[in-house]
Amino acid sequence: MKKEIKVSASILCADFTKLGDEIKKCEDAGVDMLHVDIMDGHFVPVTSIGETIVQAIRPITKLQIDTHLMVENPSMQIDNFINAGADIVSIHVECYGKRKTNCQRPEQFPKEIEHFDIEAATKDVLKIKSKGKKAFMVINPGTPLCLDSLIKDIDGVLIMSVNPGFARQKFMPEVLSKVQELRKIFDGDIAIDGGVKEDTAPLAVKAGVNILATASYFFGATDQKKVVSYLRNLKV
Ligand code: DX5
Ligand code: ZN
């Protein structure tokens, strides 16, 4: 069945000195949800924000909040983000399993794994769902599709189209084949994150994506309403 396209505004590029106004701007522009990038300086090279900010924005908006956990130990943090008000908890495949030798040292990125520990990930997915929240698995550009039996338990998959850590990076078109492959076997949400712009969003939608996360394109636009309506009306 054809899915409606949703726009998820990543607040990483919002002006944090007036976050309340920025959230209001997202609502006025008609975005469907907020994407909140949580970075711990271990799974990715930099830190961003934590549950305090999720807690602060929860009472001021009815928009769904997706917390994209770029943290080394998601298991330990899931409850914090759910208690803070997250509706969707997105956890990385690369946090479950033995790290490849080329990214075992703290300063080596992106983090990748030799083998996906599906049992450990399933436990966390079921934990998120038992609290009535949606669970998405996130897959880095260098990680193949490896969800196997987990696919029946998850609500969505977030395909990274850049290596996580920073906004304003270049979209990696090579991840589109993963989207196509996944869409053949998965009817849930497929989101994409990183470098989504006017020219790359149509490629993602054509491949099977139905949620477009955007930070710099959305927050950098002079007419944010126009951005949302452009993205939402892209044809499959
Ligand atoms: C990257 C983050 C993205 C980022 C996207 O690690 O997960 O959500 O904010 O930024 P843009 O849209 O500028 O590529
Ligand atoms: Zn993100």
Image (cartoon, grey):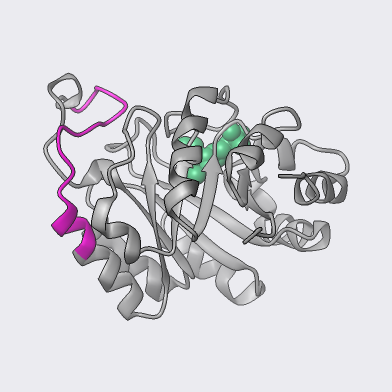
The image shows residue 164 at horizontal and vertical percentages of 42, 34
Name the foreground residue: 118 vs 40. Answer: 118
Question: Residue at horizontal 86%, vertical 39%?
Answer: 222
The image shows residue 220 at horizontal and vertical percentages of 75, 36
Question: Residue at horizontal 57%, vertical 26%?
Answer: 171
The image shows residue 219 at horizontal and vertical percentages of 73, 42
Q: What stretch of residues is rendered in magenta?
A: 106-122
Question: Residue at horizontal 15%, vertical 24%?
Answer: 105
Query: In this picture, is 185 found above or below 56?
Result: above
Quarter of the picture holding the C terminus: top right
Question: Residue at horizontal 37%, vertical 63%?
Answer: 154
Q: Main secondary structure of the magenta part?
A: loop
Tell me: 14 left or right of 83.
Answer: right
* Residue 172 appears in the rendering: no
Query: In this picture, is 128 found above or below 210?
Result: below
Query: In this picture, is 195 found above or below 124?
Result: above
Tell me: 26 left or right of 80.
Answer: right
Name the foreground residue: 82 vs 94. Answer: 94
The image shows residue 141 at horizontal and vertical percentages of 40, 30
Name the foreground residue: 110 vs 52. Answer: 110
